[in-house]
Amino acid sequence: MTWPETLEINDFLGGWHLSRVIDDRYAGQRGTLEGAAEITRDGSRYIYREQGTLSLGGQVMQAARQYLWHPLPGGVDVRFEDGRRFHRIDLSGATTGDTHACSPDMYRVNYDFAGWPEWRALWRVGGPRKDYEMVTVYRR
């Protein structure tokens, strides 16, 4: 997998179309989310917001989430809205993923920037309460 040579946090600023597929093996259902993400800058921090239409389990609903992005050398520290650490995005290409323990479940993410400016996030979540895979594709 090849990364763009100079990918940095400011390259993510602005709007993105997002398309997500959720394969929930635990619940035995498949879902999709179509929507938009926007990354804005507020001083030294960056705010990731997404919203869209979630279709899951025969229901259609509006969904939204927000994370705080903090620049790190060669990457991004992703935090929940309340400031708790979530995971790291490595923009140097040294690693493709990270983990987040939410006991008793484990979240594993892999990023793919090889088709930049299209990029992907693949989450695999497992544990006694969860078993799903979620792939999100971002496009300008």
Image (spheres, rainbow, N blue to C red):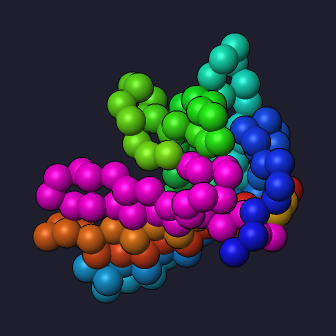
Using the image as rendered, state which of residue 1 and residue 120 is in the foreground.
1
Point out residue 129 in the picture as x, y percentages from the top left corner.
18, 67
In which image quadrant can residue 96 be found? bottom right
Q: Nearer the viewer, residue 82 or 72?
A: 72
Q: Which residue range is magenta in the image?
A: 89-115
132 within the magenta span: no
Asked if residue 96 can be seen in this view, the reply is yes
Q: Residue at x 27, y 61 (%)?
A: 106
Q: Is residue 90 magenta?
A: yes
| Residue drawn at point x = 81 percent, y = 43 percent | 11
Q: Please state if 88 lies on the left or on the right of 41 as rendered.
A: left
Find residue 27 and report its image quarter: bottom left
Residue at 44 percent across and 46 percent down: it is: 87
Give above or below for 130 relative to 4.
Answer: below
| Residue nearest the viewer, comparing 94 with 139 | 94
Could you tell me which quadrant the N terminus lies in?
A: bottom right
> Residue 45, percent across and down?
63, 22
Relative to 73, 6 lies left or right: right
**Residue situated furthest top in the rendering:** 43
